[in-house]
Image (cartoon, rainbow, N blue to C red):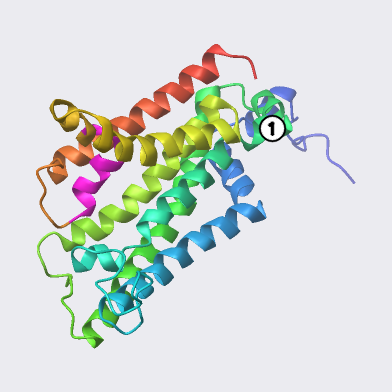
Amino acid sequence: MSTPNAAAPPATTPTTAAAGLRLTGTRLLRSELLRFVTVRSNLLTLGALAALMVVIGLVASATATGQVESVAPGGGPGPGFAGGDPLTTVLAGQTPGVLVVGILGVLVGAREYGSGMIRTTMAAAPRRIGVLLARIGAFLTVVLPVVMVATLAAWALGTAVLTAGDADVAAWSDPGVPRAVIGTALYLTGIGALGVCLGMLTRSIGQGIGWLVGLVLVVPGFGALLLPDDWQDALRYLPSNAGAAFTSITESADRLDPGPGALVFGTWLALAVGGALAGLLRRDV
């Protein structure tokens, strides 16, 4: 039997319901994380990146110690295709890793434009800056831990192979080694974030990959061959050469110091984010 003074439950108005379902930055980031991890090709590509880092580092280390035959003409034991210092040898997987993580970033940034799903995304989240930052944030959240673990594993396992072969090693206590190892993981992840921005800027997987490969791999190589000597210093400010400044333990007159190199690389990332945002704000989906 009810009493006349019993308090009635508060009514749920459309305003309070909408407030409970309000789109926040955290929810947008969560949706982008869910989108990333539920696409099987993303996880397969990320796994391939980790495997490349470890396997290529092991093969390079074994080749450097003569435990396996070099693939160079002559077939005998050689210094390893990585060449240079022992840290470069154990992290030889960085070179193909740049291409893999960059392509993964472009796919994350541009895939929706090919399928047309970007219209649904922008309708659900009209603030385009939030979509861009959430997508980059989700990419970094997933990719950075995997790349960091793979880089540390490549260094540890490769160093063990070099030690077993009585070769020089880059110990963790050596000057610059922690900075270079951690910097390699950050550099690879940054290249992936650059790919995300290029994918959203160009709205095309093919064009995004083309711009990424040209900027990171083609221009530095051909520039070193074709540019006159007076212009060679400009190459130090390209993303890949700036990254080499803080991912290497060897000094070179052709590279910036680690601090300025990291600053230049960060500037490239900031410019890429700004370009992608400008494209999102000025163009229709």
Q: Residue furthest front?
A: 74
**Residue 171 placement, left or right of 217:** left
Quarter of the figure with residue 235: top left
**Prevailing secondary structure of the magenta residues:** helix
Q: Is residue 241 magenta?
A: yes
Residue 16, given in percent of the width and then of the height, sits at 67, 27
Q: Residue at x 18, y 80 (%)?
A: 167
**Residue 180 placement, left or right of 214:** left
**Residue 240 placement, left or right of 231:** right
The residue where tag 1 is placed is: 114
Secondary structure beneath label 1 = helix
Front residue of this view, candidates 240 and 29: 240
Report the quarter where the C terminus lies. top right
**Residue 119 placement, left or right of 74:** right
Numbered disc total = 1
For the question of whether residue 25 can be seen, the reply is no
Residue 75, given in percent of the width and then of the height, sits at 35, 77
Residue 278, given in percent of the width and then of the height, sits at 47, 17
Quarter of the figure with residue 19: top right
- Magenta segment, which residues? 237-248
